[in-house]
Amino acid sequence: MRPMLPIDASILRPGMRLAIGLSGGADSVALLRALEERSRELGIVPHAVHLHHGLRGAEADADLVFCKTLADQLHIPFHHAQVETTVEALPTSDKPSESIEEAARRVRYRWFRDLLSKVPLDAIATAHTLDDQAETVLAKFLRGAWTEGLSGIHPILKYPEGLILRPLLAVPRAEIEIYLRTLNQPWREDSTNRHLTFTRNRIRHELLPLLDTWNPRLREHLAHMASLARDEDAWWQVELDRLSPQLILPGLPARGGGRAASEGLALDIVRFAQIPIAMQRRLLRHAAAQLGAAPDFAATESLRDLALTGRAGQKLELAHQLLAERTHRELRLTSGSIGAAEIKSTKVTAEYLLSIPCEVEAPAFDLRLSLAFSPSASALSDQPRTALLRPWKPGDRVRIRHSTRPRKVKEVLEKIKVTGSDRIGWPVLEYNGRILWMQGIELEPEPGISVCATTLTTHEPSSL
């Protein structure tokens, strides 16, 4: 009796015109063979599709020949195209530069969607396996992903043009190779899959085998984690859809009530403070996503601190040109960068509440700062988690490194000949009631905290 590959048939439906993404590798060849073998039983019409990425030269050319030959042998319609991935990876006015891996994935799915719109197809199936799922979840975890990232590879992707399906997500790679050997079906090996310069390959060939010695079922557990994260994220999305219209407000408040049209969004601070922390974080990221930003954990915590403990007039600029400003009643979010005129006019009053650890830009002071706790300091539960970057003010004192007593900031600025308009808005960093950093001066360091500052315009270090 011939072996059967355990395909997830629940995501297929009778009458479906289904294309199989065929790279020539073991996984995609197994998926093609299994679906072709069960096409009558499942009521599907299989096609095969292959994208030549313009990489690996003659090896990729041979992959194309192999895939077309296999499709012809199985009497399956074959569609193919070629792209130049190295060119696609270059930066343009619409996107930054990408890695070859990122560009290859982007153009592949762009082509899939193009096929779905032009060829009579209902869906395209890709041969992602349980091992691929485990590698993806682990890679996302190593990069510091949120729970939506830990959801990994989804079994179904819905696009306006059609569906992308993953029927092999529960099947280990080892089982796939056994299936092909039983059929005496050859496949192609991509030589770049052994190159340890790629993060995915290092995870596959080094990290996961090491972790397998701790728990042989780790891959299965990572796949289960993806399912849990995916289902919980779906629940969160329903909650966000319910609450966000109540807390995320468009435009600016208008006299007499209502909102005036304006760029950006605002969060009602009073109501925001009343919801659980988990929802606060989700709501902030949801609002930022509407402005094209995806703040990481540190940035999200900085926004949360600004909303809950900030003062009116404080501003924060984060990655993706996400700007936040605290007013008396709202946290306003807009997209863009602070212009030179605004920098000059707001330097005197600008304040940035920083959540430690963090890496943030403070354009009002032309600074980029990185703050971190030492391992020993971060273990202290009563350690304050925020610092305030602000202009100096009369009465501020600092302890210069190797000095015997604190000195007034005004005296220090006079000593280093900072006068006139340059003195106005000179930045200092306050932590736990003490100034631990001042631009241009080396201060006595605060135990357990590191501060790294560079200027935005020259990218040169500013004295610590």
Image: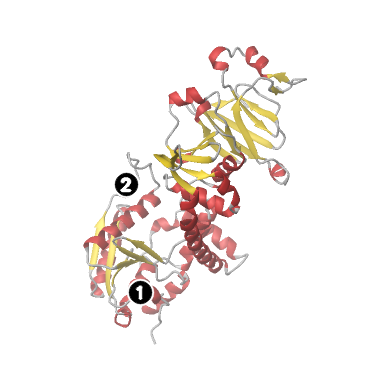
Element class at badge 2: helix
Q: Which of 62 and 125 is in front in this view?
A: 125
Image quarter of the N terminus: bottom left
Above or below: residue 415 compared with residue 56: above
How far apart marks 2 and 1 lie (CA) works out to 33 Å
- Answer few, some or many: residues within 10 Å of disc 1's Cα (few below 14, many 20 plus, some between 14 and 19): some
Q: Which residue is drawn at 51% across and 27% down?
A: 364
Q: Which of 4 and 147 is in front in this view?
A: 147
Image quarter of the C terminus: top right
In terms of sequence position, does the residue under pointer 2 or pointer 1 come before the other?
1
**Residue 404 spot, x, y in % from top left:** 77, 20
| Residue assigned mark 1 | 12
Q: Is residue 144 visible?
A: no
For the image shown, how many numbered marks are present on the structure?
2
Q: Quadrant of residue 179?
A: bottom left
Q: Which of 73 and 45 is in front in this view?
A: 45
Which of discs 2 and 1 lies nearer the camera? The answer is: 1
Q: Can residue 397 be seen in this view?
A: yes
Q: Residue at x 44, y 23 (%)?
A: 341
**Residue 304 spot, x, y in % from top left:** 57, 44
| Residue assigned mark 2 | 88
Above or below: residue 442 compared with residue 4: above
**Residue 8 spot, x, y in % from top left:** 41, 75
Q: Which mark is residue 40?
A: none
Q: Which residue is drawn at 50% across and 49% down?
A: 247
| Residue that protrudes farthest toward the front in the picture | 256
Residue type for callout 1: Leu
**Residue 104 spot, x, y in % from top left:** 35, 53
Residue type for callout 2: Glu
Q: In which quarter of the image is residue 300?
A: top right
